[in-house]
Amino acid sequence: MDNFSAIDKQQVLRDSLACWNTGKTQEWLDLGIDMVMGRREGYYFWDLDGKRLMDVHINGGTFSLGHRNPEIIAALTEAATQYDIGNHHFPSPLKAALARELTESAPGMTHAVYGSGGGEAIDLALKSARAATGRRRIISIQNCYHGHTGLAVNTGAARFAQPFLAGESAEFTKVPFNDAGAMAAALSLNDAACVIMETIPATYGFVMPEDGYLPAVKALCEKHGALYIADEVQTGLMRSGDMWAIYGYGVRPDMIVTAKGLSGGIYPITAVIMNDRAASWIFRDGSAHMATFGGSELGCAVALKVLEILRRDSTRANVEFISSYLRGGLEKIRARYPEFFVRIRQNGVIMGLKFAGDESAVTVMQQLYEAGVWGIYSMLDPSVLQFKPGLLATREYCDELLEKLEFGIGQAAAL
């Protein structure tokens, strides 16, 4: 459909309640958010009723380069004149080129294996750790999220695992974030295949790793023979100011999982970037893991363009500018409401805004929605608003955003 104004929004909501996702649709309606996305461009999108919203949720980083980025659309359009999904059994120029670019972007890595969704890529990383070590137990962080697929959902918080009778198993251990002692105890049994962590846990509210914590975890993994998997689905691809946030903490992981933004918001593609140890199964039996749509050649064309844009000096400079400029504006807003707006968690354009009160970020989200800004509360800590500006945002966009943030946060503080 190319004419969003002709779509009956209320019918879409009725159909969604009836036969798409009743619970999720009703949850948003109960919060007063009856949003159905229509037109979208850059870091804006419009509800079907014409309401314009500034997008600082960007779907977890999927739209880091903006909605419908014209360069990415052009790359897909050009690729579609020669390519299609391709055949997952055979090499291809695009798959090989992207693998080379991904491994070169991550020191110590030698292989890239593709998927079509983030959970699928997490499952592949966990399987690879088991294959490399001959061990089954997987260690993750309490109140984390790594996806909804088979192994991934077992590593996550109970909210996502229990409905599907997952997570309750001796093969999965969860420890608190920023607790090196708990991690040491969990690894000391010498039976763990791996530790998997988001470099900065997103769904838990972007809690920042304490100084030395991530290097300590990597050292413990090495001591006890476990692999370190960095889930960079939301923190990678230049959002920290570096291609992969984990390297900024002085850690070389055994695997990096990337998804969301690798697609440019246009064509699904994900990848696990591995070192030789993690990729050991590839040398023994390369057909041990396959995915028909993993590494679609059209997806590879899109991802290559995404990486090209991210590597530009202008992109890095813009990330540095946005990080500093928005932090300055947010600090001024926080100074006006210090008892309500209590903390800013930040690494580059990875930000969590912490408010007083257990579910205060839900109220902030609602007020910002009314003001024309779409951010989302952290589902595992609803006192934190996930705040994720796009990498290519302009100063004018930031000024408009800060103005609306001040209004919306002020409205929430007054309630």
Image (spheres, rainbow, N blue to C red):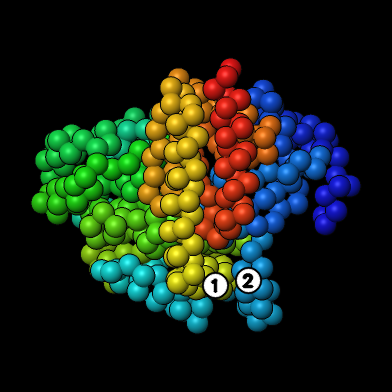
74, above or below 44, in the image: below
For the residue carrying disc 1, how many other residues have a C-alpha within 10 Å: few (<14), some (14-19), or many (20+)?
Answer: many
Q: Quadrant of residue 128?
A: bottom left
Quadrant (top left, top right, bottom left, bottom right) of the N terminus:
bottom right
Quadrant (top left, top right, bottom left, bottom right) of the C terminus:
top right
248 left or right of 25 in image: left
For the residue carrying disc 2, how many other residues have a C-alpha within 10 Å: few (<14), some (14-19), or many (20+)?
Answer: some
Mark 2 or mark 1, which is nearer the start of the sequence?
2
Amino acid type of the residue tagged 2 in the rendering? Glu
Q: Residue at point 23% right, 48% down?
A: 214
Residue situated in front as seen by the camera: 249 or 273: 249
Mark 1 lies on residue: 305
**Residue 309: percent from the left, percent from the top?**
52, 70
Residue 151 shows in this picture:
no
281 left or right of 332 in image: left
Residue farthest right in this picture: 6
Amino acid type of the residue tagged 1 in the rendering? Lys
Mark 2 lies on residue: 71
Q: Residue at point 54% right, 54% down?
A: 390
**Residue 313: percent from the left, percent from the top?**
45, 72
278 left or right of 334 in image: left
Q: Residue at point 86% right, 47% down?
A: 5
Q: CA distance from mark 1 to mark 2?
A: 8 Å
**Mark 2: which secondary structure?**
helix
**Mark 1: which secondary structure?**
helix
Q: Residue at point 57% right, 56% down?
A: 395
Find out whether the residues at labels 1 and 2 contact each other: C-beta distance under 8 Å: yes
